[in-house]
């Protein structure tokens, strides 16, 4: 117990740092590339972005919605800063003899439309995921963790995908490509969650024992517009 009377968690800050790191890497490194493997077309970042939803599930399951909400806001702020930093660096005039400006713009020069779509989709998707998991935990009295993690991901990733791809690419990409990538990425995201369910169980079990916490959101204020816990 901390001096302020609030519980002290040994691993909460570490989980927050991992969440933000995965979020930034998947958005900055993987967002710009579309790949085709075995005839299946998808955004390359989707191979890693769903891990952030797994961490969101773990945070909500162990620490509760309010503490997961704080982490989501930390991630949101990190994406805002990364987007601003990318804009500033891309905008700076290149030095004479440095010939990589065009390549740099291709990778890091995301348009304001894509940035807006990414931020909006992340915000609504992550909070939808956390809200559904918290409500399902109370409704099931903590049973069937697999149902909560997969069910919340189905909802959260659906909201994320239906916001991001149309807002970011409709009218820029061919409409069929937008729909194809949106559906394929959604399938990959949900499949990711299902495949790593045994790992999620181990992480959740470890944290619950280590932190001596298994939070239930019976009286939680579910507004997303707060960082209070």
Image: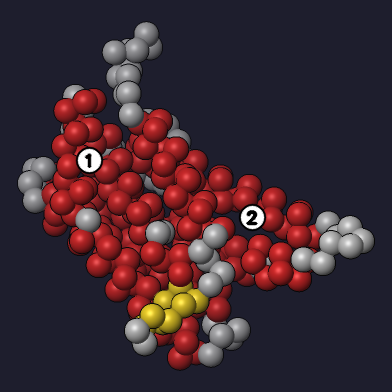
Q: Is residue 48 above or below residue 13?
A: below
141 or 173: nearer the eye?
A: 173
Please tell me whether mark 1 or mark 2 is closer to you in this view: 1
Q: Classify residue 87 as left or right of residue 156.
A: right
At horizontal 63% and vertical 69% (from top left) the residue drawn is 113
Q: Classify residue 7 as left or right of residue 13.
A: left
Name the residue that disc number 1 marks. Answer: 203
Name the residue that disc number 2 marks. Answer: 83
At horizontal 38% and vertical 12% (from top left) the residue drawn is 4
Image coordinates of residue 187 in percent, x first then y, are 29, 73
- The secondary structure type at the circle numbered 2 is helix
Quarter of the C terminus within the rendering:
top left
75 or 184: nearer the eye?
A: 184
- Let me know if residue 216 appears in the view: no
Image coordinates of residue 33 in percent, x first then y, are 53, 72
Q: Choose top left, top right, bottom left or bottom right for residue 216.
A: top left
Q: Are marks 1 and 2 in contact (CB under 8 Å)?
A: no
- Let me know if residue 4 appears in the view: yes
């Amino acid at each position: 117990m901390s001096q302020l009377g609030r519980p002290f968690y040994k691993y909460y800050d570490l989980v927050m740092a991992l969440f933000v790191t995965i979020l930034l890497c998947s958005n900055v490194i993987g967002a710009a590339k579309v790949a085709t493997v075995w005839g299946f077309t998808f955004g390359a970042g989707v191979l890693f972005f769903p891990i952030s939803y797994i961490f969101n599930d773990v945070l909500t399951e162990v620490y509760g919605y309010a503490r997961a909400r704080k982490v989501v806001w930390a991630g949101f702020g990190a994406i805002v800063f990364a987007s601003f930093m990318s804009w500033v660096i891309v905008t700076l005039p290149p030095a004479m003899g440095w010939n990589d400006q065009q390549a740099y713009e291709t990778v890091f020069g995301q348009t304001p439309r894509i940035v807006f779509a990414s931020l909006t989709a992340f915000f609504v998707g992550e909070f939808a995921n956390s809200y559904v998991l918290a409500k399902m935990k109370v409704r099931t009295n903590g049973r069937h963790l697999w149902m909560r993690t997969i069910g919340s991901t189905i909802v959260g990733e659906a909201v994320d995908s239906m916001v991001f791809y149309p807002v970011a690419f409709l009218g820029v990409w061919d409409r069929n490509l937008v729909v194809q990538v949106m559906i394929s990425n959604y399938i990959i995201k949900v499949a990711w969650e299902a495949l790593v369910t045994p790992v999620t169980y181990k992480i959740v079990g470890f944290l619950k024992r280590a932190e001596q916490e298994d939070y239930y959101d019976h009286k939680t204020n579910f507004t997303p517009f707060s960082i209070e816990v």
